[in-house]
Image (spheres, rainbow, N blue to C red):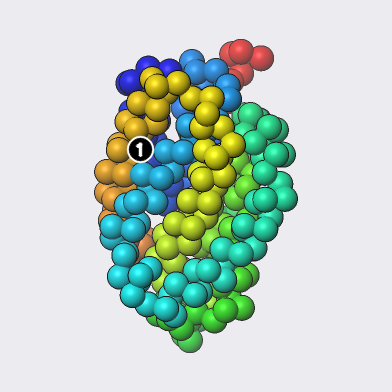
Amino acid sequence: MNFLQSVILGVVEGVTEFLPISSTGHLILTARLLGLEQDHFLTSFEIAIQLGAILSVVVLYWKQLLCSWKVASRVAAAFIPTAVLGLVFYKIIKKIMLNGEPVVLWTLFLGGIFMIVFERFYREKENSVENLESITYKQAALIGVFQSMAMVPGVSRAAATICGGLLLGLKRRTIVEFSFLLAVPTMLAATALDLLKNSESFSQGQWGFLAAGFAVSFVTAILSIRWLLGWIRSHSFQAFGFYRMAAAAAFFFFVYSRTT
């Protein structure tokens, strides 16, 4: 990896983390396009630069996280299912799933179909939850279960939590913002676990690449969050479904199929 490649991956992480298109899947496929080998450091890099995206949420939503017990406690309730399942399946995710480009392509494509169908039939209820403080602990915990599906690369943490929240009766903006907040403990735990296990093997130069990816992902994540909040005022998530299908098909036909 070189500096430019770390910056490119940082941009991809920041742009895609909070959109329902799978940041992990895009990082894996981008690394392939850049000619990077999916080695031990790259896998850790793809996890660790999520810290930049985490910081963007903290900067934008620090009042909800630090000053509202009702919001913070619901985020905690949603995080528990993901934490438990993440600890149980960490080794499988790290060694098998994060190295599986076919898995990413299939989940990107099928996830796109699901989002299109979901938006075609979904209708928001009149009594949908409008405020973060009004989310029940049961709803929060179930959202956490939906989020755990994103352990499979390409599924998209944002898509899983948003669709799950809509099904559970939350308004679109409410579940989108809750998804932002839930990303903080989720990604922080995943990054801390990985760095704790692997940081001693990183060289000084590799720490520099991590710093560059972190900084770039922070800036681009702020822009991505603000753009998404504007988008959902008058659009559904159907366009992201079509994008996922197109991205999976383009990568397969123009890159993956030529090397198999």
Three-letter code, disc 1:
Phe
Residue drawn at 30 percent across, 70 percent down? 63
| For residue 201, above or below residue 138 | above
Q: In this view of the protein, which residue sits in the foreground, 112 or 102?
A: 102
Q: Quadrant of the N terminus?
A: top left
| For residue 52, above or below residue 71 | above
* Kind of element beneath mark 1: helix
| For residue 237, above or below residue 165 | above
| For residue 1, above or below residue 51 | above
Residue drawn at 44 percent across, 57 percent down? 184
Q: In this view of the protein, which residue sits in the foreground, 203 or 173?
A: 203
Is 44 placed left or right of 131 in the picture? right
Q: How many residues crowd mark 1 within 10 Å: few (<14), some (14–19), many (20+)?
A: many
Q: Residue furthest bottom?
A: 127
Residue drawn at 30 percent across, 36 percent down? 216
Image coords of residue 194 (percent x, y): 56, 39
Image coords of residue 208 (percent x, y): 35, 26
Residue drawn at 38 percent across, 20 percent down? 205
For disc 1, the marked residue is 214
Count of numbered badges drawn on the protein: 1
Do we see residue 109 in this rendering?
Answer: no
Image coords of residue 111 (percent x, y): 59, 48
Q: Quadrant of the C terminus?
A: top right
Do we see residue 191 in this rendering?
Answer: yes
Q: Residue furthest top?
A: 259
